[in-house]
Image (cartoon, helix red, strand yellow):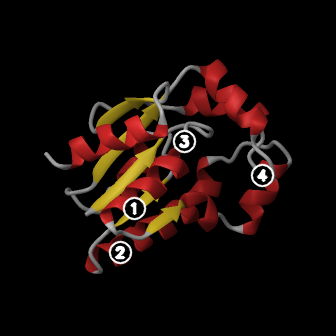
Amino acid sequence: MLIIVTGVSGTGKTTLGSALAAHLSLPFYDADDFHPAENIAKMSQGIPLNDNDRKPWLEALASKLTESKAGGGCVLACSALKESYRKILGVDSSVKWIHLKGDRDLIWARMLARKNHYMKAEMLDSQFATWEEPAYGLKLSIDQTPKELLQEALSYLDK
């Protein structure tokens, strides 16, 4: 099973994704860990990435998904803000998509509370501007507890 948890920064993709992976006994991957050093340097300076910056990163993630499918699957937490990005990541028609959504002010507060993360809270507006809401997959509101989000995601995956 391939599961991709998407949403703007600060929505809890890593929290939900790692909980799903643990519950389903699947490997968990955070897309942030696959960024090349150049991308991290740009984001650390508050410079949003462009599509050219993202292309090799998305291709590396797609390769990881394909490799993982052969081993039984995985859970990937990835912003996947645009449909064109999700097309690259949709390596198989069986990919299950979970999209986290929430109020900008709630997400802003979460981002301000984060420590030691290269993604700066000031970049949140650029992520909202880039976000293309998909018409498929499960859409979860982040104004729930992590446990409630996990239960809702598991119910969706059982279908």
Q: Is any atom of residue 119 visible in this view?
A: yes
Q: Which of marks 2 and 4 precedes in the sequence? A: 2
Q: Which of marks 1 and 2 precedes in the sequence? A: 1
**Which callout, 2 or 1, points to the residue nearer the camera?**
1
What amino acid is labelled 3 in the image?
A: Gly
| Residue corresponding to mark 2 | 68
90 w.r.t. 60: above or below? above
Seen as rendered, the residue at the extreme left is: 159
Nearest the camera: 158 or 103?
158
Quadrant of residue 95 within the rendered picture: bottom left
Tag 4–tag 3 contact (CB < 8 Å): no
Q: Which of marks 2 and 3 precedes in the sequence? A: 3
**Helix, strand or loop under label 2:** helix
Of the numbered discs in the image, which one, if any, rests on residue 21?
1
| Residue corresponding to mark 4 | 118
Rounded to the nearest angstrom, the CA distance separating label 2 from label 1 is 13 Å
> Could you say where residue 124 lies in the image, as x and y percent from the top left?
68, 31
**Which callout, 3 or 2, points to the residue nearer the camera?**
3
